[in-house]
Structures are given as structure tokens and as C-alpha cells.
Image: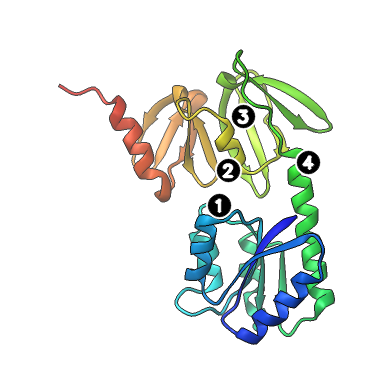
Amino acid sequence: MVRCIIIDDEPLALQQMEAYVKKIPFLELVASCQSAIDAHKILETEKVDAMFCDINLPELNGLDFVRSLENPPMVVFTTAYSEYAVEGFQLEAIDYLLKPFGFDDMKRAADKIKKRYDAIRTLQEVSQIDEDDAIFLKTEYKIVRINISHIRYVEAMSEYLRIYLVDYARPIIMLLSMKKMEERLPSRKFLRVHRSYIINLSLIREVSKNRILLDEDIEIPIGDSYRDQFNAYINSKFLTK
């Protein structure tokens, strides 16, 4: 089941979408929210795979709400204003529903969510780290075994990842979420330093204000949301008088 929430400040719109969700067998409605603030509270306590989010919300609009989430679920934006469409898709929205929309439109968007959900569940399984420091990755219809210590860095590109290795000329590309990869890699060896990058800490050569230089002169940006965590790591290793 795809666990979803609905966010809309109009009670009638919420009621209509609730009815639509109940008619779609693979959707499970976790909560209906009338603001982004209420939705954020749900995301903090519940597992949510997808959300149908109105853009014109009080206090914090839907676009800014999604931007504020470190690991947002799949999102379908809903709005009465077509001019938001481009901005919505820039946030990697699964779909964009222009109000008023009917059940068929909702079902098509839900089908897109289910397709993405199934693809990620099928291909995102990275094996548990075993005793010889190896993981198995599914890529290009084959399974590749790699040593964790050979990972230079991981780069996100939409729902795919590029995994750059010490002993591979080209990156391994696979369908997997950044969050899942972050959970699988040992935190004592790897750190997420940007929304789109996880690095091998042992390969750091230099650090500037906004950049990390890895071996082979690879530059990785430091994201504002990850700066404190990275600085804490550096400070823990800093040699002082």
C-alpha cells in the first residue's frame, strides 16, 4: 500500500480528494491536513510515501513546504493556477493537477505514484553490509558487488544515484533514494554533505568555505542544511595546540 496524505485548506476539496483516495485500492490515507504546518507534524511521526499537496496554502505555500523538506515523499501538486506548473515540476513532482479535476485525473496521478513506488521498491534494495565490507547493487539488469571503502562519493540525480568508485572508470547508476543509501552506508565512514552528495570521509584532502576537495581533485559542494553536521565532524578531528 502507498501511504499518502492530502493537504488543502479548502474543506470541500479535502472531502472530495478523500473520497477519491478511498476508491483507489493501492492508496492508504494517513491524514488530511489543512496547512503545511499540520502536514509537517504528520511527516515527523508517520511513514508517508506520497502526498497530494495544494500550492495555495496559508502561512506556508505548498512549493515552499516541499522545498523545506530534507527528504520529501513523492508529491502531486494541486492548484487552480496553471502558472505554477513549471515550478512544481522543477521540484520533481510526480504530477500536477489543475483544479477542478475529476476522479480520472486523480487516478492517473495515483497510477504514476504507484509506478514510481513499485520501481523504487523493486530496485532500491541494497544488500546489508556484510562482514567483509561489501554491498551488492542492482544496475543495468545485473548485480554488482562492491567494497564500501571503494566508494568515493554518491551523487543524486532525480530518483537515480551515481555511485563513483575508486576502481571503476565510470559511475554505477541505479534507481535508489538518497535516504536509503545514506541509511545503508556506515556513518563512521560516510557523511551526507549536500542534498545531492554523500562523501567518503577518508578521501577528504582539503576543505574551503563552501567546497570539499576529495582525491583526484573532485570538488563537492557543502549544502547549508548539512554544514553544521560536517563542521562538527571536522572539529572532532581538528588538531589544536
**Viewer-proximal residue among 77 and 117:** 117
Q: Residue at x 58, y 20 (%)?
A: 150
Packing grade of label 1 (10 A; few <14, some 14-19, many >=20) is few
As drawn, which residue projects farthest toward the top? 132
The residue to which callout 1 is attached is 71
Real-space Cα distance between discs 4 and 2?
16 Å
Q: Earlier in the sequence, mark 4 or mark 3?
A: 4
Real-space Cα distance between discs 1 and 3?
22 Å
**Residue 240 seen in the figure:** yes
Q: Earlier in the sequence, mark 1 or mark 3?
A: 1
Q: Earlier in the sequence, mark 1 or mark 4?
A: 1
**Where residue 164 is drawn, which disc sits there?**
3
The residue to which callout 2 is attached is 179
Q: Residue at x 48, y 60 (%)?
A: 68
Real-space Cα distance between discs 1 and 4?
20 Å
Label 1 close to label 3 by CB (< 8 Å): no
**Residue 98 seen in the figure:** no
Could you say whether the residue bearing mark 1 is in a helix, strand or loop?
Answer: loop
69 is higher (above) or lower (below) than 217:
below
Q: Quadrant of residue 63?
A: bottom right
Real-space Cα distance between discs 1 and 2?
7 Å
Q: Where does the image place residue 71, in percent across and percent down from the top left?
A: 55, 52
**Viewer-proximal residue among 214 and 112:** 112
Could you say whether the residue bearing mark 4 is in a helix, strand or loop?
Answer: helix
Question: What type is the residue that disc 3 sits on?
Answer: Tyr
Q: Earlier in the sequence, mark 4 or mark 2?
A: 4
The residue to which callout 4 is attached is 122
